[in-house]
Amino acid sequence: MVRAAVLPAVDAPLEITEIDLPDPGPGQVRVRLAAAGVCHSDLSLSNGTMRVPVPAVLGHEGAGTVVAVGEDVTHVAPGDAVVLNWAPSCGGCHACGLGEVWLCANALNGAADVYARTAAGVDLHPGLNVAAFAEETVVSAGCVLPLPDGIPLTDAALLGCAVLTGYGAVHHSARVREGETVAVFGVGGVGLAALQSARIAGAAKIVAVDVSPEKEELARAAGATDYVVASENTAREIRALTGKQGVDVAVECVGRATTIRTAWDSTRRGGRTTVVGIGGKDQQVTFNALEIFHWGRTLSGCVYGNTDPARDVPILAEHVRAGRLDLGALVTERIALEGIPAAFENMLAGKGGRALVVF
């Protein structure tokens, strides 16, 4: 029995309770969590913006130590430090065949499985495959990546989503080049990672945008050269900061129609807007046909930073070891399982960066 944060139903309060976690079967790994990040996607799952089978244990950004492995697991062993990968690629679908593993058609199949039970015998599903809001979890072998040497295990949890997503949005989706100008909308965990990644890419000007004036210091520490408090004049302010041209690249980490539209309006003619934020079906973004032609801008979605975790985690680890990437700077609060509901409220209120559950 281990303690976990259980979502009993969509839009229901989380319940901190003990669950019955089985031993790993063939092709499975049991992991003792060191830490788990509280991501906006967890909030979207809890309120029904994104659908998962319930009851479920949420949490998809985590790192820990292997406790046991099932048959046929050879790439990790008990005692190994690992990062959880919530979207393992199958290697056989059309997207995987194209090398676009972040779009794998079967990546989330495991979320429908029953992986544990409550003390009362109720079946539980593993959220986005990995159920990181628990002291321990049992996952498919594809959901664990060996943690490279020299990375603090607790902070390594952030590699599993926020950093992969923010880094990938900048380097793989938007493909920011040295000397370009960048605007990042939303200074949460992913936004902070995107700001650091834009700095690593050599961006000449990095504008952070958020509704909260209190996040300016956090944004500048991550690499922002300028800070704009979001308003109806945001696009105009960004153009004023870039010689009336607009930025080369806008990275939207919020998932709201108005923010996506503002990000688009903030880019120069021929600029690129990458949308990372996950919005609801009610968030409708509109453009007219003439402006699409005239501005020649590119608008693209971005799933998991368009990353291949097996390839990119070692690259990120090297940035950490070299001092270019500061994982701890993304964390503004370290909490226990009981603190997750308050962390959800802070996200809704636009407060702080990443909250990290530390076990």
Image: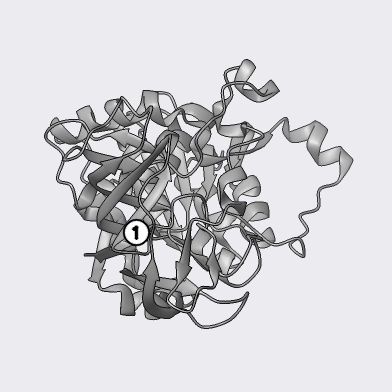
* Residue highlighted by disc 1: 37
Instruction: Count the numbered circles shown.
Output: 1
What sort of colour scheme is used for the picture?
one colour
Q: Residue at x 47, y 41 (%)?
A: 242
Q: Which sits in the foreground, 13 or 24?
A: 24
Q: Which image quarter holds the C terminus?
A: bottom left
| 34, above or below 80, in the image | below
Locate residue 84 relative to residue 129 in the image: left or right: left
At x 19%, y 53%, the residue is: 154
Question: In which quadrant is the N terminus drawn?
Answer: bottom left
- Please give left or right for residue 148 compared with residue 4 in the image: left
| Residue at 47% in and 58% down | 186
Q: Is residue 353 visible?
A: yes
- Name the foreground residue: 229 vs 44: 44
Tell me which corner region of the image, top left, top right, bottom left or bottom right, holds residue 189.
Answer: bottom left
Q: Dot 1: few (<14), some (14–19), or many (≥20) neighbours within 10 Å?
A: many
